[in-house]
Image: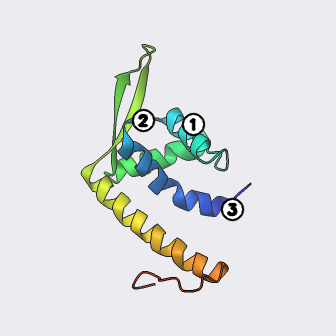
Amino acid sequence: MNYNPNLTRSMMEPLVLQLVAERKRYGYEIIRVVNERTNGAFEWKEGTLYPCLHRLEEEGLIRSAWEKAQTGRKRKYYGITRRGRAVLAEKSSEWSSFSTAVNAVLFSITGSTLPSGV
């Protein structure tokens, strides 16, 4: 399924933060993992991912370092910072509340309890 590019772009930063919170990852690995976990629903390209990584690094949410991979090649690995973990927790909570509210309207969930403030 092709999703609205604005919707997928708005979720890119929290998804990248989640992946680099799990462990340090290099750019192509992030693209591959997103593709695998979404069963191909999100087809990120390097031209979209790398500007996002640069923004996150400039904001102090991730940091990068060149490391030697198992293949012997040097790769730039990205890891999350303490501030990045805090932002990830905030964005995850925000998404959970938002998606619950949207689903309550779209699917007319009866008896659902919406989080306070929604």
Of callouts 3 and 1, the N-terminal one:
3
Image quarter hosting the N terminus: bottom right
- Regarding mark 2 in the picture, which secondary structure is present there? strand
Q: Amino acid at mark 2?
A: Arg
Residue at the spot 42% in from the left edge and 17% down from the top edge: 70
- Regarding mark 1 in the picture, which secondary structure is present there? helix
Of callouts 1 and 2, the N-terminal one:
2
Numbered marks: total: 3
Residue at the spot 47% in from the left edge and 83% down from the top edge: 113
Give how far apart the Cα atoms at labels 2 and 3 are. 26 Å
Crowding at label 3, few (<14), some or many (≥20) Cα neighbours within 10 Å? few
105 on left or right of 23: right
Give how far apart the Cα atoms at labels 3 and 1 are. 20 Å
**In the image, residue 32 above or below residue 7:** above
Q: Amino acid at mark 1?
A: Arg
The residue that label 3 is drawn on is 4
21 on left or right of 42: left
- Regarding mark 3 in the picture, which secondary structure is present there? loop
2 on left or right of 24: right
**In the image, residue 31 above or below residue 109:** above
Where is residue 31 drawn, in percent x and y?
Answer: 56, 39
Crowding at label 2, few (<14), some or many (≥20) Cα neighbours within 10 Å? many
Where is residue 111 drawn, in percent x and y?
Answer: 54, 86
Of callouts 2 and 3, the N-terminal one:
3
The residue that label 1 is drawn on is 32
Give how far apart the Cα atoms at labels 1 and 2 are. 11 Å
The residue that label 2 is drawn on is 25
Q: Amino acid at mark 3?
A: Asn
Where is residue 95 drawn, in percent x and y?
Answer: 47, 68
Where is residue 105 drawn, in percent x and y?
Answer: 62, 83
Residue at the spot 54% in from the left edge and 61% down from the top edge: 10
Of 27 and 89, nearer the camera is 89
